[in-house]
Amino acid sequence: TIGRSRGYKLCISLAVYLSVLMLLYTSVNRALFAYDGVTNRLRLSDSGVGGVLELASKLHPRRPLYGLCRVEQPGPALSHIVMIIWVGEGVDDYRRAECATHVPAIRAFFKVKPNTHQMKVLKCSEY
């Protein structure tokens, strides 16, 4: 269990941690994480080499999901791992609020630095 916010526990499995290592040291360049049913246990839902476009195709309008994707930049050793926090339009308000309380713990677990770039919120039809 990591993080506790407003009484909600969040559990992150060992598979989630191992998938981060895959992103860093293998050809896998994307990983998608989902809650296990209606629990607060985060698990690896999908991974592969399709990049951002394939990751975007896996986002579901009725589920909260978290994604990590390695994005290559032109030039030597210029790649970034981007974190995507997705809450589909069909997620009910209670679950939406609960998931929002998990974001600080998830960012801390993945060691995500605050983003200085402007973020854009995309609708399901935009990807």
Image (cartoon, helix red, strand yellow):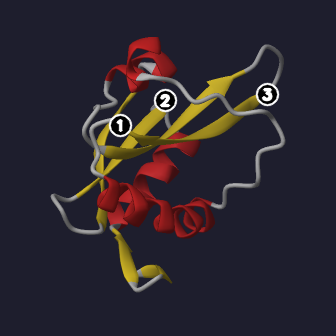
Q: CA distance from mark 3 to mark 2?
A: 15 Å
Q: On the image, which quarter does residue 124 sit in?
A: top left
Q: Which residue is mark 3?
A: 78
Residue at coordinates 35% horizontally, 67% vertically from top-left?
14
Q: Which residue is mark 2?
A: 27
Image quadrant containing the N terminus: bottom left
Residue at coordinates 58% horizontally, 44% vertically from top-left?
24
First reached walking from the N terminus: tag 1 or tag 3: 3
Q: CA distance from mark 1 to mark 3?
A: 31 Å
Q: Amino acid at mark 1?
A: Gly
Position of 21 with respect to 87 (left or right) is right
Determine the secondary structure under disc 1: loop
Q: On the image, which quarter does residue 94 sit in?
A: bottom left
Q: Mark 2 or mark 1, which is nearer to you? A: 1
Residue at coordinates 34% horizontally, 20% vertically from top-left?
57
Q: Which mark is residue 88?
A: 1
Q: Amino acid at mark 3?
A: Leu
Percent of width and height locating residue 117: 81, 35
First reached walking from the N terminus: tag 3 or tag 2: 2
Label 1: how many Cα within 10 Å (few below 14, some 14–19, many 20+): some
Q: Amino acid at mark 2?
A: Ser
Determine the secondary structure under disc 3: loop
Q: In this rendering, is residue 78 above or below 20? A: above
First reached walking from the N terminus: tag 2 or tag 1: 2
Image quadrant containing the C terminus: top left
Q: CA distance from mark 2 to mark 1?
A: 28 Å
Percent of width and height locating residue 90: 27, 38
Label 2: how many Cα within 10 Å (few below 14, some 14–19, many 20+): few
